[in-house]
Image: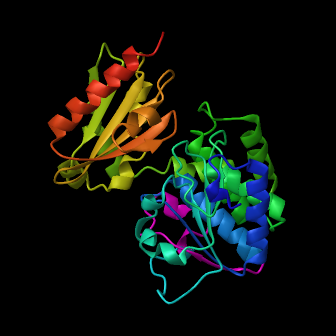
Amino acid sequence: MPDSDLPFPNFETSLKRIVSTLNDGGSFLITTHRDPDADGIGSMLALGKALLNADKDVVLWTEAPVPPPNNRLKGADSIVQYIDPERDFDVVVILDCAGIERAGRLQGNAEKLKPLINIDHHETNSFFGGLNLVDVNSSSTGELVFKVIKLGGFPVDRDVASNVFAAIQADTGSFRYNNTSPTCLRIAAEMIEHGANPWKISREVMDGYSLSRLRLLEMALGTLEFYHSGKIGVMTIFIEMFSKAGAGPEDSEKFVDYPRFVSGVEIAVLIRQTGENDYKFSLRSNSRVNVAQLASRFGGGGHAKAAGIDYHGSIGALKEDFLREAVQLLDGIPN
């Protein structure tokens, strides 16, 4: 029975089937979700390089060019945005992506995505692959990719190690979040033994701020609002603010942490305008609230502590609807 027929596939069984498929295949297309983060890109680059080290034919694809700072990851310049429509691959791998619709234009070629491997750690994952390795208890997709690489016996060099480390580091908030586990710390230590440089990766990927990013942050901090006795913190970035700061959407990465840092905030929200009436809500929870459940009420998803929503409509109405649901969720959780 294929994994896609099972609601909760056995992890070890799925892992072995995926490793066998990767070992048997000769050509691979590897991608991640739209607007990818360091976990998605790092996982792509790590798995891609490990397969290349095993003399496999690998194409790494994203719908749009990888923006800073993730374009500074080792091998990011090998990621392409065009694939010959006539080309077939033995295996397609989608990483860190909760649903096939988040994989961009690839979903339009679903009939060619066979066999399809889905490796992810989001609790809202729809198990869309023919083979699914989904573990919500893993710190990151990078952690899962490393387990695939290790069981498969694929060669680990400094580039592979650096990208696995970057993926884990990013999704654990530099090993500060609740998803930091003994397992991911052991993997990180092993990656350092293989040549990953934590300081260099942190400076290039986590802390490499541009002046335009700081100007955008200055404006964004001026929009901070607090609701429900200070339990909900909201920051908003409008399109004209990007233009004024000379910044791009990637420069707002992790801005949602700033309302989260405020004492007493349970739900932190970054609202980013992406079109005339289009908005992206990034949600973070400090402790009691499962923001993935909150996001799912609006067609979004993610993790218990980090989730997102894509909205269309009037910002006033959207905020009102969101705050009503957020307050209802907060009031229903025991102290």
Please state, as top left, top right, bottom left or bottom right, where the N terminus lies in the image: bottom right
Q: Where is residue 111 in the image (x, y as percent from the top left)?
A: 50, 76
User: Which residue is pictured at 21% across the width and 46% down the height?
Assistant: 238
Q: Position of residue 140 (x, y in %)?
A: 62, 47
Q: Position of residue 44 (x, y in %)?
A: 60, 64
In the rendered image of this protein, does residue 72 appear above or below residue 270? below
Direction from residue 226 to residue 161 in the image, left or right: right
122 falls in the magenta region: no
User: Which residue is pictured at 54% across the width and 58% down the height?
Assistant: 128
Direction from residue 113 to residue 143 in the image, left or right: right
- Part of the protein shown in magenta: 54-77
Identify which residue, 1 or 313, lies in the foreground: 1
In the rendered image of this protein, does residue 68 appear above or below residue 237? below
Direction from residue 32 to residue 297 in the image, left or right: left
User: Which residue is pictured at 66% across the width and 38% down the height?
Assistant: 137
Q: How is the image coloured?
A: rainbow
Q: Residue furthest top?
A: 335
**Location of residue 102 by image quarter:** bottom left
Residue 247 in sight in this render: yes
Identify which residue, 300 or 250, lies in the foreground: 300
Query: Secondary structure of the magenta portion, mostly?
Result: loop
In the rendered image of this protein, does residue 52 appear above or below residue 281? below
66 falls in the magenta region: yes
Residue 197 in sight in this render: no
Identify which residue, 202 or 148, lies in the foreground: 148
